[in-house]
Image: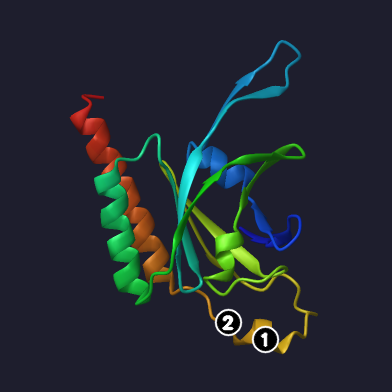
Amino acid sequence: MANNVKENGKDAMALQITKPARKADLVDESEGPDGKNRTERMANLRVYAFEHFLLAFDIDRVDESNIAELVRKASEYTDSIYRATEAQVQKSGHGYQISVTIGADAGWKVGMPIGTYPAPGMLGMGLGERVDSSNDDPEAKEHTSVPPHIVSETVKIGRNLADMRKTQAGE
């Protein structure tokens, strides 16, 4: 699923991540007495920027050595690495968003469609398919998506690391 990067205050960008955040366990919710979901926890994240791609990790649930391995792999696959920043999953309407100002380092701009790729404790985010085919912005057409093998390999590594953690914890 692709959501467009949106403006989030002066010189800031954000991305709606409600379903992927739930799938990646970046939020903990419970049902309140009124039947509505209540947010119990929103993840503290470390977000790394690569060419057209971001990786966000729940720093309270993903081990530093696992983060380092995934960042190394993503850097090799994209032949790039820029900077990292701290962020937090935030409430946005009835869902969740993440501040992706670091997305500018990855070449993102407000309005660009971004696909999200959840795995336990992490979220990969890369340029998705164009959502608005009537958008004739020539600059947007120049951007290419992250090759699918990079996303799938990174998410696969994240899932393997999650499985290893469960095995080590005896689950």
Residue 159: x, y in percent?
Answer: 33, 47
- SS state under label 1: helix
- SS state under label 2: loop
* Label placed on residue 166: none
Left or right: where does residue 53 sit relative to residue 104?
Answer: left
Residue 71: x, y in percent?
Answer: 33, 59
> Which residue is found at the position 43% from the left and 70% from the top?
148
| Circle 1: residue type | Glu
Q: Is residue 40 above or below residue 48?
A: above
Picture quadrant of residue 93: top right
Quadrant location of the N terminus in the rendered image? bottom right
Residue 144: x, y in percent?
Answer: 54, 81
Residue that mark 2 sits on: 143
Picture quadrant of residue 41: top right
| Circle 2: residue type | His
- The way the protein has been coloured in the rendering is rainbow
Residue that mark 1 sits on: 139
Residue 51: x, y in percent?
Answer: 46, 74
Q: Are marks 1 and 2 in contact (CB under 8 Å)?
A: yes
Left or right: where does residue 151 sit relative to residue 101?
Answer: left
